[in-house]
Image (spheres, rainbow, N blue to C red):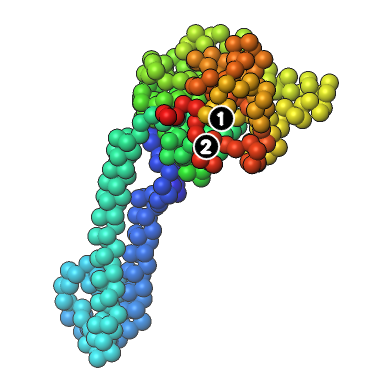
C-alpha cells in the first residue's frame, strides 16, 4: 500500500492489497485541477484581443491578465457572470471546443476527488470488516525481524496460505516489508490488548512471538494467553534464564535463539562437518530437511528403522519418543513420524498425500 509506511498508526490494520492512499489521490487531482486552471488562463490571455469586458469603464476591447484569471475561474466553475465574453469568431470556437472540455474536466476532477476519497475510505473499512469476520484459526506472528521473517517463510514454504498469517510489529520498516510479502499487518505494541484484538489473537490457533527483547516476549505471552487460553504459543527468547519465565507466562514452546546460535558456532569450531549438517537441516528447500509426516497404511506394524525415511522420532498420544524407544518398536495407527529426508522429493521416499497413498488413520 503506497504511503502506508508514513501513515501507519498504532493498532492500525493494514491489509496486503496494494492500493494508493486517498490523500495521495487527492493531492494528485488538486494538482491536475490547478494545471487545467493555469492552462485556461494562458489560453485566454494569449487570445485577449478576442474578448470584450463590458464592465470596463474605458471601453477597451481586450482583457488583461487579471481579467483572464477572473474569466477562467468563473467559466470553469460554471458561474458565468457574462461581463467578459469572447467576441471574435476564433475565440468563440476556442471556447466551444477547448474551454468547454476543460470546464468539464475541471468539474469532474473536483467532484470525482471527493467521491473517490469517500469511496476509498468506505472500501477500506468494508475490507477490514470483511477480513475480521472471516479471519479465524489463523497464525499471528508478533515481531517481523530476522526471526519472525524466517518463521513466516517456513510456514508459507510448508503450505500455509499468506491469507492465514497476520503480522504484529511496531516498526514501519517491518510494515513495508510485510506488505511487500503480501501479508496483513497490525502496527503497534504487542503487549497491548487492543493491538492484539485487531490482529484477531482471540480467534487464532497459533501465535509465534519473536520480539527483540525478552521482557517484551513475556508481556506479549501473558497478554496473548489472557485473550486466547487455547492458542498454541511459541516464543523465542535470547537468554536461557528467561525460558522458565516465558513458560510460566503461558508459552507452550520456547526456543532460545542465542544458545542455539552459540551451540552452532561451537560445533563449527570443534567439528565443521557436523555444524554443516545441522545448518543444512535448518535450511529449507535444499539438501536435507526435518519434516513431520503421517504414517502410511503400509507402514503400520513396522519398526521405525525399516522405513525409507530416516525416522528420528515418533509422535504418539501427544508424546515424543525417540526412534529407538521400546514403546515405539512397532508403529501403530495414529502415529506421526519426524523424519530426516532429502528436500527434493524422491520416488522411494513419497510424501503422503502427493502420490495417492492411504494414510494409517484413514477409515477402511
Residue in the picture at 36% in, 50% down: 23
Residue in the picture at 73% in, 19% down: 263
The quarter of the picture where residue 189 lies is top left
The percent position of residue 227, horizontal first and vertical second, equals: 37, 18
Q: Nearer the viewer, residue 35 or 304?
A: 304
The percent position of residue 187, horizontal first and vertical second, equals: 44, 32
Return the mark for residue 298: 1
Side of 7 relative to 68 (left or right)? right
Residue in the picture at 42% in, 20% down: 231
The percent position of residue 140, horizontal first and vertical second, equals: 45, 29
Q: Which residue is outermost to the bottom?
A: 89
Side of 339 relative to 273 (left or right)? left
Quadrant location of the C terminus in the rendered image: top left
Which class describes the residues within 10 Å of circle 1: few (<14), some (14-19), or many (20+)?
few
The percent position of residue 237, horizontal first and vertical second, equals: 59, 18
* Circle 1 SS class: helix
Which is in the foreground here, disc 1 or disc 2?
Answer: 1
The quarter of the picture where residue 362 lies is top left
Q: Decide: marks 1, 2 in contact (CB < 8 A)? A: yes
Q: From the viewer's perspective, is residue 144 above or below residue 75?
A: above
The quarter of the picture where residue 212 lies is top right
1 or 2: tag closer to the N-terminus = 1
Q: Nearer the viewer, residue 89 or 139?
A: 139
Q: CA distance from mark 1 to mark 2?
A: 9 Å
Q: Nearer the viewer, residue 247 or 8?
A: 247
Residue in the picture at 24% in, 82% down: 96
Count of numbered tags = 2
Q: Which residue is mark 2?
A: 357
Which class describes the residues within 10 Å of circle 2: few (<14), some (14-19), or many (20+)?
some
In the rendered image, is residue 199 in sight?
Answer: yes
Side of 124 relative to 246 (left or right)? left
In the rendered image, is residue 72 in sight?
Answer: no
Amino acid at each position: 500500500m503506497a504511503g502506508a509506511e508514513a501513515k501507519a498508526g498504532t493498532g492500525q490494520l493494514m491489509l496486503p492489497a496494494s492500493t494508493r492512499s486517498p490523500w495521495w489521490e487527492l493531492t494528485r487531482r488538486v494538482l491536475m485541477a490547478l494545471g487545467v486552471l493555469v492552462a485556461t488562463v494562458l489560453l485566454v490571455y494569449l487570445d485577449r484581443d478576442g474578448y470584450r469586458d463590458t464592465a470596463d469603464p474605458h471601453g477597451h476591447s481586450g482583457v488583461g491578465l487579471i481579467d483572464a484569471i477572473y474569466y477562467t475561474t468563473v467559466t470553469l466553475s460554471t458561474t458565468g457572470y457574462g461581463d467578459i465574453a469572447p467576441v471574435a469568431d476564433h475565440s468563440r470556437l476556442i471556447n466551444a471546443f477547448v474551454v468547454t472540455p476543460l470546464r468539464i474536466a475541471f468539474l469532474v476532477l473536483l467532484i470525482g476527488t471527493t467521491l473517490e476519497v469517500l469511496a476509498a475510505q468506505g472500501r477500506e473499512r468494508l475490507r477490514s470488516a470483511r477480513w475480521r469476520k472471516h479471519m479465524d484459526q489463523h497464525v499471528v506472528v508478533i515481531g517481523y525481524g530476522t526471526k519472525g521473517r524466517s518463521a513466516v517463510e517456513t510456514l508459507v514454504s510448508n503450505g500455509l496460505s499468506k491469507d492465514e498469517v497476520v503480522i504484529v510489529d511496531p516498526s514501519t520498516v517491518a510494515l513495508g516489508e510485510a506488505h511487500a510479502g503480501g501479508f496483513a499487518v497490525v502496527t503497534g505494541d504487542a503487549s497491548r490488548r487492543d493491538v492484539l484484538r485487531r490482529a484477531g489473537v482471540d480467534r487464532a490457533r497459533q501465535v509465534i512471538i519473536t520480539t527483540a527483547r525478552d521482557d517484551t516476549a513475556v508481556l506479549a505471552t501473558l497478554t496473548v494467553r489472557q485473550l486466547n487460553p487455547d492458542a498454541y504459543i511459541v516464543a523465542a527468547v535470547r537468554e536461557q534464564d528467561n525460558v522458565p519465565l516465558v513458560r510460566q507466562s503461558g508459552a507452550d514452546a520456547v526456543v532460545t535463539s542465542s544458545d542455539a546460535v552459540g551451540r552452532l558456532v561451537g560445533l563449527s569450531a570443534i567439528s565443521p562437518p557436523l555444524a554443516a549438517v545441522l545448518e543444512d537441516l535448518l535450511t529449507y528447500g535444499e539438501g536435507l530437511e526435518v519434516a513431520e509426516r503421517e504414517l502410511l497404511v503400509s507402514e503400520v506394524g513396522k519398526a521405525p528403522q525399516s522405513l525409507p525415511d530416516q525416522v528420528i522420532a515418533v509422535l504418539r498420544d501427544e508424546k515424543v519418543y525417540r526412534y529407538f524407544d521400546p514403546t515405539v518398536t512397532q508403529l501403530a495407527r495414529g502415529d506421526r513420524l519426524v523424519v530426516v529426508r532429502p528436500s527434493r522429493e524422491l520416488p522411494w521416499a513419497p510424501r503422503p498425500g502427493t502420490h495417492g497413498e492411504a494414510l494409517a488413520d484413514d477409515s477402511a
